[in-house]
């Protein structure tokens, strides 16, 4: 198993507990909903509501979570709900719209007005239509013991509170039953057979997002079992923490990867949701430390194919047309650019270099005039959370005008350098045209970006 994750879960037990709460709401009583709505952009944002007891609930979207601006609503539901939770400190929550597609997980946090006794057992849960609840992933608390937080990739209804060990184990069993998954060792994976049906690009991400929530929920189940002492007093036939990690890799992560890969490839194998899904699956398997030969090898093959076929490519075509003498020079070419690891704001560095071909001709009554050579090109800049590329393109031309005349051949160097700054984004379709007037002619440059959303781990 991955002992870094195990250490993380064990550290989750070391929580500082504050004073007992003396101002908790009467959750048996129905009250009005408390709601707020905000527009969230690709650069991130948050919503915040405060319940009748002063508890602060915050929903935070990191930069890059959304591809466009969406209206999001966060509501504290005033209607009482009977949930399999021993102690609740806040009412249930709802986040709309349900079909919001996230590329990075959102965070839900609860800052208690008075930290409850036993806060180390508090968690945030996703509520399912069949009356199941599962803990959200990446459960954590701040050092003061007054805040509990977790992450989610899907919207919906959520709850908070403290479960008993029996309640927790019952919900664990219900989750496995809903997935038709055994928690025994050595489950045979079904034969690999890719679907002949063509799926929409978003279908791959939707399928994998659901599995990611399951996997992160399982990790939180393990964390809560540690806190409640389950692994210290194992029942007869119970799994150790190492056993549970093995089952997570074998019976859930392996099954999830296989199901997504069995969908085959979309008609456009470089579409954003598909490449994002392949990258996310690789990252998850690495994070879990899962080593399942058949599944891992198959995923690695698909990952390498995406890397090879779906690199971000910049294409540059320019034409210099000098009407006097019919002098026309064209510069064309394409080469990959690399998007380096992004920072917390969702901004990443971009770099790349390549060679463009220079060709051309010039009219002459007695001579044959041709142009040949190359232009070395360097691209550098940034890409932000909204996939807006700000690029500087530096060129250095090394070409030659060759004039073959009846009595002699003349070679004239055509050298020079320059730089241009361009913005490529969704707004201009990742394509820009530069038109300039030059002495006795014109200059046009077309710059475009192919596969702008491909940002894969290992692609540096």
Image: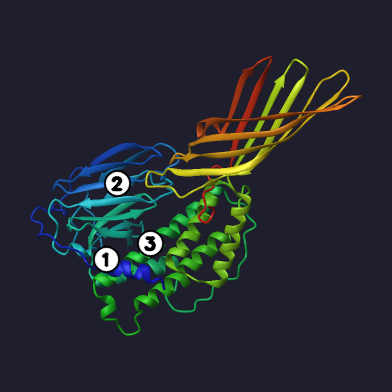
Left or right position of 237 against 26 = right
Quadrant of res 192? bottom right
User: What whole-number distance in Å separates the C-alpha atoms at marks 3 and 1?
Assistant: 15 Å
Q: Which is nearer the eye, 356 or 238? A: 356
* In the rendered image, the vertical position of residue 66 relative to residue 182, given as above or below: above
**Circles 3 and 2: CB atoms closer than 8 Å:** no
Estimate how packed mark 3 is, as few (under 14), some (14 to 19) or many (20 or more) residues with alpha carbons within 10 Å. some
Q: Nearer the viewer, mark 1 or mark 2?
A: 1
Residue closer to the observer: 23 or 220: 220
Task: Classify 10 Å Cα crowding around label 2: few (below 14), some (14-19), many (20 and above).
Answer: many
Q: x%, y% of residue 259?
A: 53, 62
Residue tagged 2: 59
How far apart are the two marked residues, 3 and 2, measured between alpha carbons? 18 Å
**Relative depth, front residue between 152 and 329:** 329
Looking at the rendered structure, the secondary structure element under dot 3 is helix
Q: Which mark is residue 216?
A: 3
Please provide percent x and percent y for residue 139.
29, 60
State the residue position of label 1: 12
Query: Which element is circle 2 on?
Result: strand
The quarter of the picture where residue 414 lies is top right
Q: Residue at x 27, y 49 (%)?
A: 93
Question: Relative to 171, is 447 on the left or the right?
Answer: right
Q: Residue at x 57, y 71 (%)?
A: 294
In the image, 211 versus 94, the foreground residue is 211
- Per the image, label 1 sits on a secondary structure element best described as loop
Total label count? Answer: 3
Q: Earlier in the sequence, mark 1 or mark 2?
A: 1
Q: Earlier in the sequence, mark 3 or mark 1?
A: 1
Sooner in the amino-acid sequence: mark 3 or mark 2: 2
Q: Position of residue 216 (x, y in %)?
A: 38, 61
Looking at the rendering, in which quadrant would you find the N terminus?
A: bottom left
């Amino acid at each position: 198993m991955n002992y870094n994750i195990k250490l993380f879960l064990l550290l989750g037990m070391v929580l500082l507990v504050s004073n007992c709460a003396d101002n908790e709401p009467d959750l048996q009583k129905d009250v009005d909903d408390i709601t707020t709505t905000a527009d969230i952009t690709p650069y991130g944002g948050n919503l915040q509501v405060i319940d009748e007891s002063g508890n602060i609930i915050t929903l935070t979207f990191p930069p890059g979570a959304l591809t466009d601006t969406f209206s999001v609503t966060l509501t504290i539901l005033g209607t009482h709900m009977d949930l399999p939770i021993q102690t609740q400190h806040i009412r249930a929550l709802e986040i709309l719209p349900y079909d919001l597609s996230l590329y990075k997980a959102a965070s839900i946090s609860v800052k208690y007005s008075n930290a409850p006794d036993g806060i180390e057992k508090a968690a945030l849960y996703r509520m399912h239509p069949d009356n199941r609840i599962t803990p959200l992933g990446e459960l954590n608390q701040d050092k003061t013991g007054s805040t509990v937080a977790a992450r989610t990739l899907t919207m919906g209804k959520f709850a908070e509170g403290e479960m008993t060990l029996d309640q927790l184990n019952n919900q664990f069993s219900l989750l496995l039953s809903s997935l038709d998954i055994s928690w025994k060792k050595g489950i045979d994976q079904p034969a690999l057979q890719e679907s002949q049906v063509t799926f929409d690009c978003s279908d791959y991400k939707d399928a994998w997002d659901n599995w990611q929530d399951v996997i992160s929920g399982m990790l939180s189940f393990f964390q809560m079992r540690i806190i409640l002492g389950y692994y210290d007093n194992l029942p007869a036939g119970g799994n150790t923490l190492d056993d549970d990690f093995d089952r997570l890799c074998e019976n859930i992560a392996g099954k999830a990867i296989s199901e997504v890969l069995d969908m085959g490839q979309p008609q456009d194998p470089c579409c954003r949701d598909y490449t994002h899904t392949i990258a996310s699956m690789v990252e998850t398997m690495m994070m879990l430390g899962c080593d399942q030969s058949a599944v891992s090898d198959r995923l690695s093959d698909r990952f390498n194919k995406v890397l090879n076929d779906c690199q971000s490519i910049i294409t540059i075509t320019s034409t210099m047309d000098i009407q006097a003498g019919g002098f026309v020079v064209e510069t064309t070419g394409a080469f990959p650019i690399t998007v380096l690891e992004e920072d917390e704001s969702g901004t990443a560095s971009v770099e790349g270099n390549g060679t463009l071909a220079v060709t051309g001709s010039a009219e002459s009554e007695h001579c044959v005039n041709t142009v040949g050579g190359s232009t070395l090109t360097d691209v550098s800049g940034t890409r932000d959370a909204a996939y807006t590329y700000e690029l500087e393109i530096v060129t250095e031309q090394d070409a030659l005008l060759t004039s073959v005349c009846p009595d002699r051949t003349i070679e004239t160097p055509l050298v020079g350098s320059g730089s241009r700054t361009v913005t490529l984004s969704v707004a201009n379709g990742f394509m820009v045209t530069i038109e300039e007037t030059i002495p006795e002619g014109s200059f046009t440059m077309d710059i475009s970006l192919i596969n702008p959303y491909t940002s894969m781990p290992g692609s540096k």
